[in-house]
Amino acid sequence: TEYWDISGWAWHKVGVDVQVAPLIQFLNINGVRTLASCCGHGKEEGHVSIVEWSIPKAQSLGYEVGPAPDGWPWAVFPP
């Protein structure tokens, strides 16, 4: 799935796994800056990696935040 990411300084088109696209869009609209994502492909838990300064905002939205399995420091995990 592709959508237009507005979380950065400019609009840009990004490709994401369809299973996490709604979460990414919700996070971006609500001020959480996303970096990378993966649906897990049936092998691990899906997640969306975020920048550190977005952690308090993600937590205030009710999301668990922890180390990302893809090497990024922080990730949001779908409920």
Image (cartoon, rainbow, N blue to C red):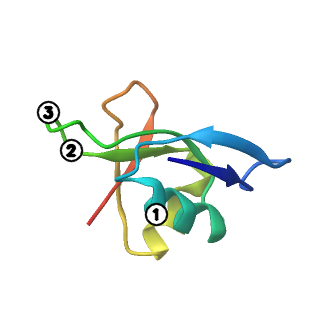
Answer with left or right where residue 28 lies relative to residue 41. Answer: right
Give the residue type at disc 3: Lys
Mark identifier at residue 46: none
Which residue is at 37% across, 66% downward? 63
**Mark 1 vs mark 2: which is more N-terminal?**
1
Q: Nearer the viewer, mark 1 or mark 2?
A: 1
Give residue 6's position: percent from left, percent from top.
Answer: 74, 56
Which residue is at 14% across, 33% downward? 43
Residue 60 vertical position relative to residue 70 in the rendered view, above or below? below
Give residue 11's position: percent from left, percent from top.
Answer: 81, 49
Which residue is at 40% across, 50% downward? 18
Give the residue type at disc 1: Pro
Disc 3 versus disc 1: distance between alpha carbons? Answer: 20 Å
Residue 6 vertical position relative to residue 75 in the rendered view, above or below? below
Q: Secondary structure at mark 2?
A: loop
The residue under label 2 is 45
Mark identifier at residue 22: 1
Answer with left or right where residue 28 lies relative to residue 36. Answer: right
Q: Residue 44 sits in which quadrant?
A: top left
Disc 2 versus disc 3: distance between alpha carbons? Answer: 7 Å
Give residue 79's position: percent from left, percent from top.
Answer: 26, 66
Answer with left or right where residue 53 lies relative to residue 16. Answer: right
Furthest residue to the right? 10
Give the residue type at disc 2: Glu
The residue under label 3 is 43
